[in-house]
Image (cartoon, rainbow, N blue to C red):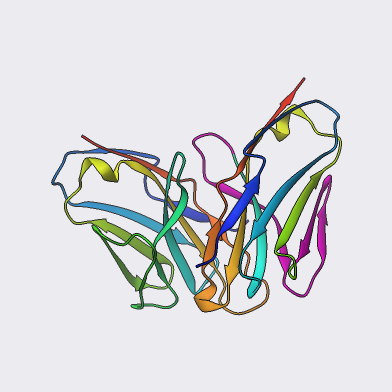
């Protein structure tokens, strides 16, 4: 069974803290993604990576950075957490190319910044 | 930029009804379109993937169709059950780096 695993289901952090969200996939996928999901705004792409050490900005990268040192792991970093980063964060992975590029998602991390 | 729209935003039906969820997108240069299900507070579960060369895909009681030229996809759910209650999202995958763009979803409630 294919799997994308996010390190935490729920996190509560203080304003100004550095926050790490971890995502691991076991499908040998080239592409990995970080989205945030907010009521009324849907899923918005923060960053994605199509290979180890490669990253591309999505639609809302401000206040975030990412790291992909190994193919199976993609980390989202909030350099200095703020209350407007309270959200549901979703990690996904997919195969590169034109066929069989089905995306698989993790269970989500509900982050609250207080 | 690709815009993805889902109609209706919410739908409530009695158990047993057949129903159709709609998804439209503005740019037809897509690899694939994928339908997902999301239960409250959870991640997304993949339901069906339609490749750009295909017209439809079926899985059990679900059937999804794709018309690239008109920028539309439909998800047909046959004989709905209370367990089908969830939010259904469609996503189009662009040629550029396999990026996915999502609609805001249709929240389905199937009443017993």
Q: Is residue A77 magenta?
A: no
Left/right of residue A29 with respect to residue A9 in the rendered view? right
Magenta stretch: includes residue B60: yes
- Viewer-side residue, B66 vs B26: B26
Residue positioned 20% across, 45% down in the render: A82
Percent position of residue A16, x then y:
13, 46
- Which residues make up the magenta segment? B39-67
Q: Is B16 situated above or below A70? A: above
Predominant SS of the magenta segment: strand
Which x, y percent locates residue A110?
Answer: 38, 40
Q: Quadrant of the C terminus of chain A?
A: top left
Q: Is the residue B16 above or below the residue B88 in the image?
A: above
Percent across and percent down for residue B36 are 64, 50
Q: Image check: A108 left or right of B67?
A: left
Which residue is located at x 40 percent, y 40 percent?
A9
Q: Tell whether B62 sits left or right of A106.
A: right
Find residue B77 and report its horizontal and vertical position in percent: 80, 42
Q: Is A73 left or right of B57, judged from the image as shown?
A: left
The total number of labels drawn is: 0
Q: Name the outermost residue toward the top.
A: B112
Please tell me which residue is depicted at 81% across the width and 33% down the height of the picture: B80
Image quarter of the N terminus of chain A: bottom right
Residue found at x 37% / y 49%: A7
Q: In the image shown, does B1 or A111 lie closer to the viewer?
A: B1
Quarter location, residue B52: bottom right
Q: Nearer the viewer, residue A25 or A36?
A: A36
Name the residue at the left extreme. Answer: A16
Asked if residue A93 is positioned above or below residue B45 in the image, the reply reads below
């Amino acid at each position: 069974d294919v799997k994308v695993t996010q390190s935490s289901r729920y996190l509560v952090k203080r304003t100004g803290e550095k926050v790490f969200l971890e995502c691991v996939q076991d499908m040998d996928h080239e592409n990995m993604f970080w989205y945030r999901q907010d009521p009324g705004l849907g899923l918005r792409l923060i960053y994605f990576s199509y290979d180890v050490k490669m990253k591309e900005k999505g639609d809302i990268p401000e206040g975030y950075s990412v790291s992909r040192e190994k193919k199976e792991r993609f980390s989202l970093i909030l350099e200095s957490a703020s209350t407007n980063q309270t959200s549901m964060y979703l990690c996904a992975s997919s195969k590169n190319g034109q066929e069989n590029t089905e995306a698989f998602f993790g269970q989500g991390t509900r982050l609250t910044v207080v | 930029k690709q815009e993805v729209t889902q109609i209706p935003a919410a739908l409530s039906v009695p158990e047993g009804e057949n129903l159709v969820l709609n998804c439209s997108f503005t740019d037809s240069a897509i690899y694939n379109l994928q339908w997902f299900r999301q239960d409250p507070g959870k991640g997304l579960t993949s339901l069906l993937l339609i490749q750009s060369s295909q017209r439809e895909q079926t899985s059990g009681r679900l059937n999804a169709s794709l018309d690239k030229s008109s920028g539309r996809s439909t998800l047909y759910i046959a004989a709905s059950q209370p367990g089908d209650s969830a939010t259904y999202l469609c996503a189009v995958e662009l040629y550029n780096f396999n990026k996915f763009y999502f609609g805001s979803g249709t929240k389905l409630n199937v009443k017993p």
